[in-house]
Image (spheres, grey):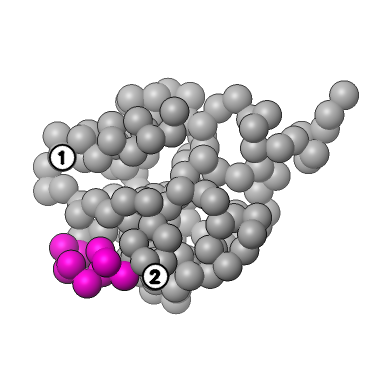
Amino acid sequence: MMSIKSAQMSTIRFPCVLIVDDDADDRELLTSVLSSINKDILFITAHDGLEALKAIEDLIFLPHLIMLDLNMPRMGGKDFLREIKRHPKFSKIPIYIYTTSADIRDQEETKGLGAQAYFVKPTNYSGVVYVATNVLSQMT
């Protein structure tokens, strides 16, 4: 019998999403919308990049994807992205940027750093649903 500690990501039967954002309201809204689409998602949240790195290192399985804000205290999204892509164990986790910045330079830089996609945070609920649906469709 395999213990949970030795389980590989492929043996985890539920999707896991790590949300990294310093805005508690944005974390809560994104979590709420994603879970309304798929009630089986396990969420892990972090306030900034440093907290996210600690969380991912402590997990016994890898998240299926990471939703990442750019502008955060202590360690911002770009620095987190650079760091996570350096680790062979974590480098294949899809990372979706979810930020208020519409700056094309940020979009190009994060794509160059290995981000899967870039979403500017919507200003309305239906926009958040659109982003969440888009992201979850990538998990299958």
Look at 65% across and 37% down and name the residue there: 9
Does residue 103 belong to the magenta stretch? yes
- Residue 77 found in image quarter: bottom left
Residue, disc 1 = 127
Instruction: Look at the numbered disc 1 and give the secondary structure of its residue.
Output: helix
Look at 33% across and 56% down and name the residue there: 97
Instruction: Specify the farthest residue to the bottom.
Output: 74
Residue 119: percent from left, percent from top: 24, 51
Between the residue at mark 1 and the residue at mark 2, the CA separation in whole angstroms equals 24 Å
Does residue 82 belong to the magenta stretch? no
Of mark 1 and mark 2, the one earlier in the sequence is 2
Dot 2 crowding, Cα within 10 Å, few <14, some 14–19, many 20+: many
Q: Is residue 2 above or below residue 111?
A: above
Residue 34: percent from left, percent from top: 35, 33
Residue, disc 2 = 78
State the residue in front, 3 or 136: 136
> Of the residues shown, which amino acid type is indicated by label 1?
Gly
- Left or right: 39 with respect to 63? left
Residue 13: percent from left, percent from top: 60, 25
Q: Is residue 33 in view from this perspective?
A: no
Query: Which region of the structure is painted magenta?
Result: 101-109
